[in-house]
Amino acid sequence: MNDPQRPIMIGGVWHYYYLYNADYPEGNGTEWYHTTSTDLVHWQDHGVAIDKYKNGLGDIETGSAVIDVNNTAGFGAGAVIAIMTQQHEGVQRQSLFISTDGGYRFKAYNGNPIMDNPGAEHWRDPKIVWDDTRNEWLMVLAEGHKIGFYTSPDLKHWAYQSGFERNELGILECPDLFRMSLDGDPANTRWVLATGANGFKKGKTTGTLYWTGDWDGEHFTADREDPQWLDAGADFYAAVTWDAPRQTDTKQLDSRFAIGWLNNWAYATSLPTDEWHGGVNSIVRRISLQSVDGKPQLVSQPIGAFDKLEGTEERRSDVKVTTASTVTLPQPTTDAYRLRVELDAASNAKEVRFRLKEKGEHFVIVGYNFSDSTVFVKREKDAIAEAMPEVYRKVMKSMVKARNGIVKLDIIVDTTSIEVFVNDGETVLSNLVFAPVGANGLSVDSIGGNTDIRSFRLTPLKVAPVKRRDVDAQ
């Protein structure tokens, strides 16, 4: 499992595709694997939807699928069309595939490639949206240090409009472009341009970042020069976002869904896995564009349907953690759980540290520094950190101010991941973690003073198994 491909809804069912290589580790080349869901939590497996190496143009890489409601491409109203990068002998081209069975299987368009490479080394990951203001298709394409903008009347013929270039963020990948209302006001909308990038020069690692701004049909103009990060953790890359078509047009602008690949190319090939190669996605999040400290910012929260996995909650109130005392906390009984705490910002401690996935000398820390208002994740003591590249041991942190005297941490813990949502999603930090078998210990330390925990809630999470389906029956 590699890059997520933006889900589409057909007949009340979400169709989700992701990059998949059945030949790993002996062979290369990805194809699109297919799953479906009605709630974005429980999934059904349908096998490969687009096979690699079938049309002479190479494997099947990242792109996007759309429903051609108005028959602009001439394949019929409501046709499911996927446009993605194919790569053959190092040359990247864009191809079109059509599904005639509602998104389960696709066949190649005879006119491929629909966009031949102009001589670029990096020319990939087309993301396509319908621009209803101008009645045309809009594509963003990753072109090295630039994101290219293209428009089309029919999904087959594309015209270059402009480029958005940034040279300090490494090679850009998996771009996205969408419009959202600010603070839920349909009269005040902004366009959001997102991309996978490398934040090394800004003291970060690879991740998904974005700019808010304006799209005038030819150019994207950012509100600010510097980007913001959709997730401040080490492992949230190749993210995609999508709207909910069952909502009204106005409501669709209020919020979107998002999902990302939980991994980092700085160490993806060094993970302690043989046949499994970084095959983890984040939970699906709902994002909205809100004014935070005077600027538009994407805020992320777990989707409401995630609550279906929750078991019986254990709760504590007004817990004081001192530097000298040991506080006995409820302990997780499952590998997956949700920990929600509210910290009193007036605590006189310098830091509070929650040790998660604890067993012996191994653990992962999620903490908050009251002195400089930063939340942080440290995995230097997890089971694989010592053998991993240095970037794996880097402390991931983000500044988050208290709101109404409270700092909220909503921590989603799974077998190999921890996703931390801070202050109702103002900041998120997502990280892979590797713990010893049975490492479910949970403890808390207060550093440099006392920490007052207003609320502590621990909830086990049930497994949502992927159901296997007979693909041949489609």
Image (tube, helix red, strand yellow):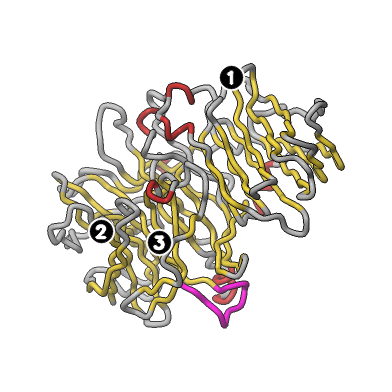
Name above or below for residue 29 compared with residue 359: below
Residue stretch rendered in magenta on the structure: 181-191
Please tell me the numbered disc located at residue 60. Answer: none
Asked whether residue 17 appears in the rendered view, the answer is no
Residue 431 part of the magenta-drawn span: no
Q: Quadrant of residue 366?
A: top right
Residue 94 appears left or right of 460? left
Q: Position of residue 205 (x, y in %)?
A: 42, 44
Q: Quadrant of residue 292?
A: bottom right
* Number of the front mark, 2 or 1: 2
Mark 2 and mark 1 in contact? Answer it, CB < 8 Å. no
User: Reading the chain from its start, which is encountered first: label 2 or label 3?
Assistant: 2
**Element type where label 3 sits in the image:** strand
Q: Residue at x 28, y 61 (%)?
A: 146
Q: CA distance from mark 2 to mark 1?
A: 43 Å
Q: Amino acid at mark 3?
A: Asp
User: Reading the chain from its start, which is encountered first: label 2 or label 1?
Assistant: 2
User: Reading the chain from its start, which is encountered first: label 3 or label 1?
Assistant: 3
Asked whether residue 332 appears in the rendered view, the answer is yes
Please tell me the numbered disc located at residue 437. Answer: 1
Please tell me the numbered disc located at residue 143. Answer: 2
Q: Nearer the viewer, residue 324 or 237?
A: 324
Mark 2 and mark 3 in contact? Answer it, CB < 8 Å. no
Residue at which label 3 appears = 176
Q: Amino acid at mark 2?
A: Glu
